[in-house]
Each structure stands twice: as structure tokens, then as C-alpha cells.
């Protein structure tokens, strides 16, 4: 079993120059990592759309995968959708994965169940892997609504399989779930490891209930993961890796988190 540590760069860095500097640091360090780290933890970064092609060129022939942060809901390829990038376009730019349903997309772009169902369909039909983000808000957490909220968000996957049963067989290879409590993102606040572990167990059981082939779903934790807390998350067998925002913008902290998960896998 491999861990996954994925860097979500969001709307960062500001310039191509800074993107290249981050990649220089990352690739120099990855090159010198011990083989055991490389084998036990997959690394992926998700640059902003404008930097996707340049980043994927630099990551070609390295062990680091490249993901988009989003794709168009409207069309898998082309169309009159100003401002959108399609699944086909991000594949052409070199991405092999895309993040979908990040809470910032749900919050600032009102992404609905139907919208995410479309995006998942477009991604998978264009052979993009999907890192599907779910998680409750602070109010929902305070109200003890985490599991019902997550069940509703996961029902997009159930609906996808009902509509496109032919995707079932390959989905376990091409879908990763990232549990990210909205209140933990960028705040420095984190749930306890026990809370995350119980929620991940629920996610794994729920997804396995959609199709037998999904009984080994990779579930990552995201939300204020940093060098100091990575070991404690990595030590829990229900936590298969991390989706990292702020700490992924420095190669040193990103790789220290990856090392924590590699150590836990060894
Ligand atoms: P954070 O972001 O690590 O900065 O909290 C995580 C995310 O939004 O994926």
C-alpha cells in the first residue's frame, strides 16, 4: 500500500519565476530522496491552470504527478464556456489527475451535486484521475452533522455509477477521496486523529457499499496539515495520505510531510 501526498497550490505562486523556483527546490530534493520514500509515497502537485502546461513539462519523467485543480462542468472538450478549461484541455496540458469539489469551489462557485456529477463524468471519460474533496463546515461540525453531510457529498459517486456503470471497474484506480473539514482549511485548527480516523472509516465503508470494487478506497486527510502534525495523522491506518495547501508551497515542508507518511508505511 502506498501513501499519497498531494500539494494543492491554489492561486499560488504569483509568477512563473516563483513556480520554477518551487519546482527547482522540489525536484532537487525528490532526486536525492531515498528509494524507500519514493516507493512508499506518491507525490502529486496541482498548480493553477495557467501554470499547468509548464509544470507538467518539468515533471515529465519524474516521480511527481501533475493535477489540475478543477475542470469545466459544461463540456469535456470544447464549447462556448468563457473562462473554463475542459478535461480534454487539462489532459492535453499534461495533467493526469484533477482535484474536484474542493470546498473553495463549493463555496465561491456554488458547485452543486449536479455540477460535480458532470465534472466527475467529464474527468473520468477523458481518463483523468479524480481527487474528490468532501467535508463539513464549522457549523455542521458543531451540530454533529459531519457524517450526514459527507454522505450527501459522497452520493455524487453513487449517482455517477448508476449513470455510468461501465466506469465501476476502473474507478478504484482513478478516484481518491480527500476528507477536508472546511473549518480546518488554512486555519491551523485540526480535528483529532481519532475523529479523522472514524470519519475515514465511515467514508471507506460508504464507498464500498456503492460497488464491491471500491472496498480499498484511498482516503486522504486535508486541512492545516503541517510538519508538526503529519506524523500523528500518518500513524493512523485509516489515513492514507494528505492533501496539503499552505505547507505545499515550500518544498521542504511538503517533502517532510511526505516523509512522515513514507515512514508510517515502512
Ligand atoms: P491547507 O489547505 O493545508 O492550507 O489547510 C488544504 C486544502 O485546502 O486542500
Image (tube, rainbow, N blue to C red):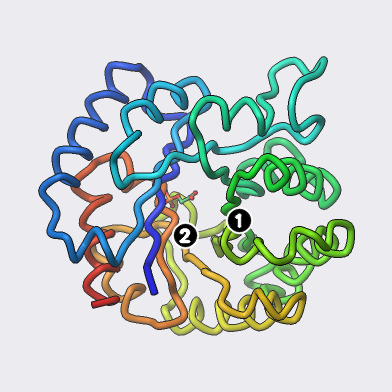
Distance Cα–Cα, label 2 vs label 1: 9 Å
Which residue is label 2 attached to? 222
Quadrant in which the C terminus is drawn: bottom left
The front one of 108 and 204 is 204
**Who's the residue at 35% across and 52% down the image?**
43
Mark 1 nearby-residue class (10 Å; few <14, some 14–19, many ≥20): many
Quarter of the picture containing the N terminus is bottom left
Q: Is mark 2 within 8 Å of ligand 1?
A: yes
**Quarter-wise, where is residue 200 in the image?**
bottom right
Nearest the camera: 132 or 129?
129
Tell me the SS state at disc 1: strand
Secondary element at image label 2: strand
Quarter of the image for residue 147 reads: bottom right
Residue 34 x %, y %? 12, 59
Give residue 190's quadrant in the image: bottom left
Look at mark 1 in the image and give the residue it sits on: 133
- Nearer to the camera, 111 or 174: 174
The picture places residue 31, in percent across and down from the top left corner, at 15, 44
Q: Earlier in the sequence, mark 2 or mark 1?
A: 1
Check mark 1 vs ligand 1: CB closer than 8 Å? yes or no: yes
Above or below — where is 107 with respect to 258? above
Badge 2: residue crowd in 10 Å (few <14, some 14–19, many ≥20): many
Amino acid at each position: 500500500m502506498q501513501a499519497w501526498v498531494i500539494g494543492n497550490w491554489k492561486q499560488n505562486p504569483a509568477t512563473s519565476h516563483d513556480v520554477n523556483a518551487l519546482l527547482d527546490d522540489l525536484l532537487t530534493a525528490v532526486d536525492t530522496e531515498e528509494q524507500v520514500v519514493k516507493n512508499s509515497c506518491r507525490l502529486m502537485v496541482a498548480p493553477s491552470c495557467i501554470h499547468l502546461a509548464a509544470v507538467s513539462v518539468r515533471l515529465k519523467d519524474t516521480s511527481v504527478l501533475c493535477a489540475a485543480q478543477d475542470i469545466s462542468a459544461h463540456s469535456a472538450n470544447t464549447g462556448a464556456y468563457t473562462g473554463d478549461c475542459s478535461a480534454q484541455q487539462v489532459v492535453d496540458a499534461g495533467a493526469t489527475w484533477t482535484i474536484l469539489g474542493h470546498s473553495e469551489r463549493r463555496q465561491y462557485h456554488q458547485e452543486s451535486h449536479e455540477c460535480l456529477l458532470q465534472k466527475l463524468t467529464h474527468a473520468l471519460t477523458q481518463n483523468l484521475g479524480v481527487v474528490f474533496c468532501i467535508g463539513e463546515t464549522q457549523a455542521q461540525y458543531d451540530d454533529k452533522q459531519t457524517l450526514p453531510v459527507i454522505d450527501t457529498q459522497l452520493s455524487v459517486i453513487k449517482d455517477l455509477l448508476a449513470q455510468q456503470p461501465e466506469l465501476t471497474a476502473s474507478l478504484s484506480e482513478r478516484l481518491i477521496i480527500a476528507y477536508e473539514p472546511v473549518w480546518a482549511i488554512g486555519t491551523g485548527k485540526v480535528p483529532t486523529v481519532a475523529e479523522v480516523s472514524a470519519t475515514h472509516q465511515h467514508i471507506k465503508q460508504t464507498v464500498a457499499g456503492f460497488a464491491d470494487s471500491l472496498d480499498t478506497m484511498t482516503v486522504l486527510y486535508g486541512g492545516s496539515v503541517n510538519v508538526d502534525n503529519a506524523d500523528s495523522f500518518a500513524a493512523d491506518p485509516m489515513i492514507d495520505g494528505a492533501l496539503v495547501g499552505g505547507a505545499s508551497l515550500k518544498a521542504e515542508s511538503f517533502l517532510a510531510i511526505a516523509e512522515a507518511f513514507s515512514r508510517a508505511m515502512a
